[in-house]
Amino acid sequence: MAFTMMTGDLFQLGLPAVGHGCNCAGVMGAGVAAEFRRRFPDMYEEYRELCQKGDFQLGDIFVWEAPGVVVYNLATQPIPRPSAALDAIDTSVRAALSDAASRGLARLGVPRIGAGLGGLDWVDVAEVLANAGEESPVELVAVSLPTP
């Protein structure tokens, strides 16, 4: 389908699905993950339990259905430090797109996964996302916050 980039607030765009990169340690304490934790506290608790049991590994996805939106937690880094991995982003984003397609969702919005606190270069991440988006019937939308 397509990969597009836009500027805005991921949560205010009315997208049917949103996703974000997570660590596998059960921590959503900073960046976009902290906002997901704030907005979806029950999701966070279930994610934390999965991590504690070792059931959320690099490349995995944890899907949460909230009213009006499907949330994709993407296992993109092992720990909550700059440690994101391009292969984990690729694997988890493709899994999320596949799941979104099976649900009949038209679009999946993500922030600049792995390029902030994850420590990766956005150009490299954007290439991975573009390749995944082009091969999916679901439009993948990368959303950047406006610069102040």
Image (cartoon, rainbow, N blue to C red):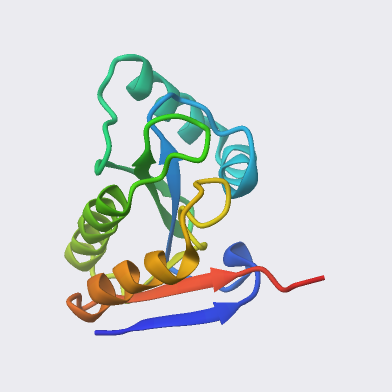
Residue 62 is left or right of residue 102, and the answer is right
Q: Residue at x 27, y 19 (%)?
A: 54
Residue 96 is left or right of residue 66, and the answer is left
Q: Quadrant of residue 39?
A: top right
- In the picture shown, does residue 133 fall above or below 124? below
Q: Residue at x 54, y 71 (%)?
A: 143
Residue 38 is left or right of residue 137, and the answer is right
- In the picture shown, does residue 75 fall above or below 120? above
Residue 145 x %, y %: 66, 68
Residue 47 x %, y %: 41, 29
Task: Say how many tags the image has.
Answer: 0
Q: Quadrant of residue 36?
A: top right
Q: Residue at x 60, y 62 (%)?
A: 11
Q: Nearer the viewer, residue 72 or 127?
A: 127
- In the picture shown, does residue 25 fall above or below 92? above
The C terminus sits in image quarter = bottom right
- Seen as rendered, the residue at the extreme top is 53
